[in-house]
Image (tube, grey):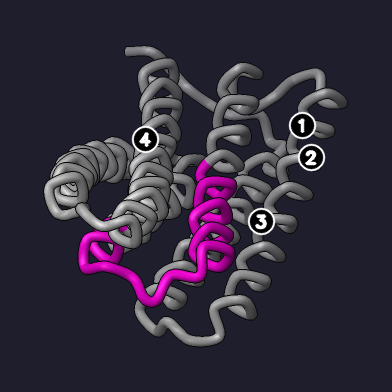
C-alpha cells in the first residue's frame, strides 16, 4: 500500500478553501439574481466584486506556488486547481454581465435550471476542496459534478434547439441570440466545474 502524507504547510489548503468558499458565494449570488430578477445591475456589481476577490486569491496561490520549494500537492495540480476555480467564477461573472447588459425582460425556466445546476456543482466542488487535505469523500463529490455537467449539457442542447424552432420575427431572433449566448455560457460553466473535478480526481489517484 502506498503511504501518503502532506508537508505541514497548510497554507495551500487554506487558500483553496477560501477560493472555493468565494466561488460558492458567486454561484449563490447568480442564483439570487436569476431567482429574484430585480436590481439586476446592483446584483451584477456584487458578482463582479466576488470575481475580483477570486482573482486576488488566485494570484496569491500562484505567488505561493512560485515561492514554495516543497508543496503538499504536485505543482501542476495546484496550478490546475487554482486556474480551474478561477475559470468557473469567470463564467459565472460572464453570465451575470450578459444578463445585465442584454437587458433581458426576465430569465427563462431553462436558464433557471442551468443556474441551479451550476450552484449544485459548485457546492460539490466546495465540499471536495474542504475535504481535499484528507481526501475524505472527494471522489463522491467529483462524481456528482460529472452527473450535473451531463444534465446541463442536455438542458442547454434542448433549450437552444427550441429557440431555433420558435424564433420567426426579428424580435424573436434577437432574443434567440441573447439567450443562446447565456445558455452557452452556462454550459461552459458546467464544463469548467467538471474540469475542476477532474483535477481533484487526478490528485486522488496520485495520492492513493
Q: Which residue is mark 1?
A: 62
Q: Which residue is mark 3?
A: 51
**Residue, x 64% and y 25% (percent of image)?**
79
* 102 horizontally vs 169: left or right: right
Q: Which residue is mark 2?
A: 59
Give the mark nearest the N terminus, 3 or 4.
Answer: 3
Labels 2, 3: front one = 3
Image height of 22 relative to 181, above or below: below
Give x and y (percent) for residue 66: 83, 23
* Highlighted range, magenta: 88-114
Q: Kindly identify which numbered label has been placed on residue 167.
A: none
CA gap, disc 3 and disc 4: 18 Å
> Which picture quadrant has residue 87?
top right
CA gap, disc 1 and disc 4: 23 Å
Give x and y (percent) for residue 178: 41, 54
Give x and y (percent) for residue 98: 53, 58
Regarding mark 1 in the picture, which secondary structure is present there? helix
Amino acid at each position: 500500500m502506498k503511504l501518503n502524507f502532506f508537508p505541514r504547510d497548510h497554507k495551500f489548503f487554506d487558500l483553496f478553501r477560501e477560493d472555493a468558499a468565494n466561488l460558492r458565494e458567486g454561484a449563490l449570488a447568480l442564483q439570487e439574481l436569476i431567482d429574484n430578477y430585480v436590481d439586476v445591475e446592483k446584483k451584477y456589481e456584487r458578482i463582479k466584486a466576488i470575481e475580483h476577490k477570486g482573482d486576488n486569491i488566485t494570484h496569491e496561490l500562484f505567488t505561493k506556488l512560485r515561492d514554495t520549494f516543497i508543496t503538499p500537492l504536485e505543482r501542476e495540480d495546484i496550478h490546475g486547481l487554482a486556474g480551474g476555480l478561477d475559470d468557473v467564477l469567470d463564467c459565472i461573472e460572464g453570465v451575470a454581465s450578459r444578463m445585465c447588459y442584454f437587458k433581458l425582460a426576465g430569465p427563462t425556466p431553462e436558464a433557471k435550471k442551468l443556474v441551479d445546476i451550476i450552484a449544485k456543482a459548485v457546492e460539490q466542488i466546495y465540499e471536495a476542496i474542504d475535504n481535499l487535505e484528507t481526501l475524505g469523500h472527494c471522489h463522491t463529490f467529483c462524481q456528482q459534478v460529472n452527473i450535473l455537467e451531463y444534465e446541463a449539457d442536455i438542458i442547454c442542447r434542448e433549450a437552444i434547439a427550441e429557440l431555433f424552432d420558435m424564433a420567426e420575427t426579428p424580435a424573436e431572433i434577437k432574443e434567440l441570440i441573447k439567450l443562446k449566448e447565456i445558455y452557452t455560457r452556462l454550459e461552459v460553466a458546467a464544463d469548467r466545474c467538471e474540469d475542476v473535478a477532474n483535477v481533484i480526481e487526478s490528485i486522488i489517484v496520485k495520492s492513493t
